[in-house]
Image: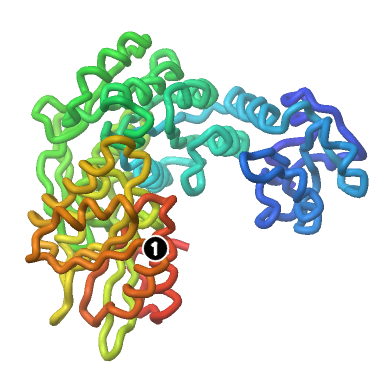
Amino acid sequence: MTFLWTTDEMIEAMAGRPFGTPPEGITGISIDSRTIADGEAFFAIKGDRVDGHDFASLAVANGASLLVVAEAKLPALGRVTVPMIVVEDVLAALEKLAAAARDRSSAKIIAVTGSVGKTTTKEMLRRALEPSGKVHAAVASFNNHWGVPLTLARMPADTEFGVFEIGMNHPGEIRPLVKLVRPHVAIVTTIAAAHLGNFASLEEIAAAKAEIFEGVEPGGHVLLNRDNAQFGFLEKAAQDAGVENVHSFGQHAKAEFRLAEFDGAAESSTLWVSFGGETREVVIGAPGRHIAENAVAVLGAVSLVGADVDAAADAFGSLSAVKGRGERHMLKAGNGSFTLIDESYNANPASMRAAIAVLAAAHPRGDGRRIAVIGDMLEMGEFSAKVHAELAGPLLAAGIEHVWLAGPEMAALRDALPESVQVEYRETTAELADFVVASVRPGDVLMVKSSLGTGFGKIVAALLDNYQAVADIGRRD
């Protein structure tokens, strides 16, 4: 059997002590007792809301062969008979194991941050690098203080390309994570008005994202969006951090990896990318200029780590949108069907505009309508009313005539839209979900988008529960 880690390796890396007779090794790592698989180790992390130690018995029942637990919690686990590694602090132990994973790896490592597009870019990198070797990348959006070390600790020793997403809500959060990851290439997708409630300006957001440069390996590379207003600031920050190779991507004439031309369709995109003295035509199986722009960054990173660029470009043809980030469903309604575009994972002003553009490019059938089903963008602070009201501009420019809203912050957009737009407003997500399910018609195209904390995923779930799928366009199980 091939182990992810032998128990001896874990004990040494984490400075832990064995309790009971441990197995020879483990096949995986989990922090979720509900989804742990046979032969995996369960790390009983204490989070803000729950303590993993309270679920140790469930982890054992679901197949855990080893527990990593805190010394202080050991007396309360007296009835648990599965072997354990006892440490002072479980999250700190996971970080130590993550560092050991990075030390033993000879993989080329790419890290992605930015205000918009991190997860999509990470998934594009995964797909683009697969033809060139064994790829390890985070599942979902594991980009925080536990997600990054967990992803690193799960990285097999024979990985050839590692892809990591690093996020933040406050200054100082990226720095320790990137020093664990130590990327050969760091990508900053863009700087936009996300988490504005925690920052005074876009410059402060850029400074927090620039922490990623501090972990770049000697001789490594940084890839920046030349079209973004913060490019100059980030370029200098990378140089000040000692990064030797700073590159750019985008439509800008001086971009090293340049989006020369873009042709967007309702469910796909064709783009022409110029770098290295030649121009490549690339077809992407997902719509949106924002996807195309990130694809250029991906091809740049593929080139910088020495992987096969042509194979990466070919791989984009089978790319599909990620769940909650543009995934499409065709659902039966009456004698026809409607299209659901699921953008429910998160939202800020930049990603909201990108999603509106995708909706504008969609094609309703018959008497169908383009409908923006949108909710609050959270963490906007004192700017909230302004940035919500300003969405009226892109909605009107895109010709969206049906806007269904929920949430206290979206009242500002409701009041900013003219009478020519048919607006439905509900105070809560649940109320809007009931309205959407009852009001959708054959031929419609609905785009559902909001910040994760508003629970707009429940609107998507309600539609999927109440209407049978004709086909899931772009779905990846």
Quarter-wise, where is residue 154 in the image? top right
- Mark 1 lies on a secondary structure that is helix
Number of marks drawn: 1
Return the residue found at the far bottom.
335
Quarter-wise, where is residue 100 in the image? top right
Query: In the shown orientation, is residue 202 left or right of residue 29?
Result: left
Which residue is depicted at the point 16% across and 46% down?
390
- Is 351 located above or below residue 194 in the figure? below
Q: Which residue is mark 1?
A: 429
Quarter-wise, where is residue 329 in the image? bottom left
Which residue is depicted at the point 7% across and 66% down?
420
Kindly tell me whether residue 134 is visible in this rendering: no
Query: In the shown orientation, is residue 78 left or right of residue 467?
Result: right
Q: Position of residue 94 (x, y in %)?
A: 66, 32
Q: Position of residue 394 (x, y in %)?
A: 13, 51
Query: In the shown orientation, is residue 248 left or right of residue 399?
Result: right
- Is 173 located above or below residue 440 in the figure? above
Which residue is depicted at the point 25% across and 23% down?
247
Q: Residues within 10 Å of mark 1 (few under 14, many from 20)?
A: many
Q: Position of residue 215 (x, y in %)?
A: 45, 19
Which residue is depicted at the point 51% across and 42% down?
142
Q: Position of residue 427 (x, y in %)?
A: 34, 61
- At label 1, the amino acid type is Thr
Kindly tell me whether residue 475 is visible in this rendering: yes
- Is 88 located above or below residue 29 in the figure? above
Front residue of this view, candidates 256 and 354: 354
